[in-house]
Image (tube, rainbow, N blue to C red):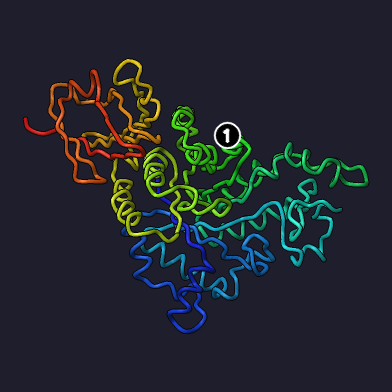
Amino acid sequence: MTHRSLYQLNTRVLLNERGRRLGRPATLDDLPDAFLDDLANRGFDWIWVLGVWQADAGSPWTITAYETHRDFGGDAALARLRERLSRRGLKLLLDFVPNHTAPDHPWAAAHPEFYVSGDGDGWPDTLQLNYRHGGLREAQIGELQRIADRCDGVRCAMAMLVQPDVFRRTWGDRGIPADGSPSKDDPFWRQAIPSVRRRHPQFLFVAEVTWDMEWELQQAGFDYTTDQRLYDRLRGRDASAVNGHLHAEPSFQERSLRFLHNHHEPRAAVAFPAPIEQAAAVISFLVPGLRLWPDEPADEELREFYARLLPCLRRPEVRDGAWQLGLCRPAWADNPTHQQFVVSWWHQGDARLVSAVNYGGWRGQCYVTLSLPGLAGGRFVLADLLSDARHERSGDELSGWGLYLDMPPWGRHVFDLRRVGV
């Protein structure tokens, strides 16, 4: 797996802002080339155009048809946007909402058997789909096929809700065919994902998932699953829990989507005060997986910080190299502050990048041995890419007793570690 960056665009918000500048309604064709050039130049690989489908007003998740919204220029404008992105090396990610539709979806009248009947639906403004119905499953695979014809990947909202055990717990006996024919409780994704990939072998599947079902969805065929647990532990300001989470199997880490903001959570600026957001961002975006960057306003301090952090993600060792989580030790006896630190590093050939964060509310100290190849016998400069700080250390010290860190609350460094001299 390679470690890439995904940029989220809120389609309606973005086009409303563009329309105000133009003095008329804007479509996808009105996204400026300079805007797309900037996304490519900043090192993003994927662009998630959120909420592009025809949906009831007020929510991009109450979908009436998987057709590009007429307000945005329709499918023709989407095709032109995809081609413009492709010319810049950018891939297009769109949405799929598997568990429900809007009440005025055509299926509601033509195929009421596709829905779970009765009261008590989790979303009162939607109709819940019945994955025990074979015709519904075939129809949903057809929708996915048509989506895959128009983009490079799909993000499946709340993908765990259609897993058989979750569906049974949620709906009980509802949806079982009344004629006594066998109910369709086979895993949907294990059927749908291979079906789509027979026609689009490189098509990307991303699952939004909670309830600790990430590994299950990865095994069902998803390339990436959202890492809600890392977000929760960062938001809880628990460095020990963060370290524990990052000790998971490498294959799980590499297929996790890291984020500090999504549409179900408060804006990052609300969930994380500025110093904590910067510390959390260094942790979240400098570990393996797919990194999700939201299109949200930021103050000048955060803009300057992200302007320094984003180029770190474009470095070859961070995209395609090897990653390791460090083990932090007490700087001296009876000093527990080493437990606040999250330290890790990337390397590829002679390129090395070390991130160090004091993810705690008081000053802390620790030692961490850098298990990196090629350190013995050399002198190295640690140049902090988030500031102008520079430190020179011997490779024997770094790979032996270790790097000494003394950092303020929520302090963060991203060191370019480079050999100097002969």
The quadrant holding residue 422 is top left
Residue pointed to by mark 1: 215
Outermost residue to the right? 179
Number of numbered labels in the structure image: 1
Residue 38 shown left or right of residue 118 in the figure: left
Q: Is residue 297 above or below residue 26?
A: above
Disc 1: CA contacts within 10 A as few (<14), some (14-19) or many (>=20):
some
Task: Please provide percent x and percent y for residue 256.
Answer: 49, 40
Amino acid under disc 1: Trp
Vertical order, 256 against 61 (above or below): above
- Quadrant of the rendered image containing residue 338: top left
Instruction: Identify which residue is drawn at 46% across, 84% down.
Output: 23
Q: Is residue 174 left or right of residue 207?
A: right
Which residue is rendered at x = 44% and y = 45% of the image? 290
| Residue furthest bottom as drawn | 23
Q: Quadrant of the N terminus?
A: top left
Q: Residue at x 73, y 39 (%)?
A: 164
x, y percentage for residue 131? Answer: 76, 47
Residue at 50 percent across and 54 percent down: it is 267
The reply, left or right, for residue 385 in relation to residue 160 is left
Q: Front-most of 138 and 344?
A: 344
- Give residue 85's position: percent from left, percent from top: 41, 63
Which residue sits furthest top? Answer: 333
* Residue 183 percent coordinates (x, y): 83, 42
Q: Nearer the viewer, residue 352 or 23?
A: 23
Where disc 1 sits, the SS reads helix
